[in-house]
Amino acid sequence: MDDTLEVMRKSYQRFLAVGLGLMLIAFLLMIWQPLGRQNSLILAVIVFLVAFLPLEFARRIARKMALVALKSE
């Protein structure tokens, strides 16, 4: 059971890090606008929307982790 939780924890951390990293990149694109105002904002919105995918996976993994932890008690 502990092995399962450890694997799930590592997956959760990876997905969360990727999602938050993408959100950081999107905000930096909005602030610095390296590609020009309009192009940077369009790319930032796309990256921001894509960032929700790994964050959703992290949320689902966290929920499964909670269920596995409660079943083991």
Image: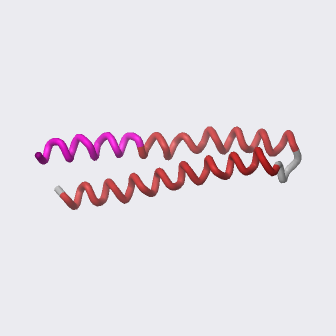
Q: Is residue 67 magenta?
A: yes
Front residue of 73 and 45: 73
Q: Could you say where residue 27 lies in the image, as x and y percent from the top left? A: 69, 46
Left or right: residue 45 compared with residue 35: left
Q: Is residue 73 left or right of residue 13?
A: left
Tell me if residue 60 is in the magenta stretch.
Answer: yes
Tell me the residue at 11%/46% (across/down).
73
Residue 37 in the image, given as x and y percentages of width and height: 87, 42
Q: Main secondary structure of the magenta part?
A: helix
Decide if residue 56 is on the left or right side of residue 73.
Answer: right
Compared to residue 11, the image places residue 52 above or below, namely above
Q: How is the image coloured?
A: secondary structure
- Residue 53: give x, y in percent of width and height: 52, 42
Direction left: furthest residue: 73
Total labels: the figure holds: 0
Q: Dividing the image into 4 quarters, which one contains the N terminus?
A: bottom left
Residue drawn 21% across the image and 45% down it: 68
Q: Residue at x 54, y 49 (%)?
A: 19
Residue 44 position within the rendered picture, expressed as x and y whole percent measured from the top left: 72, 43
In the orientation shown, which residue stands out farthest toward the front? 31
Magenta extent: 59-73
Specify the quadrant of the image occupied by residue 21: bottom right
Q: Residue furthest right?
A: 36
User: Residue at horizontal 32%, vertical 54%?
Assistant: 8
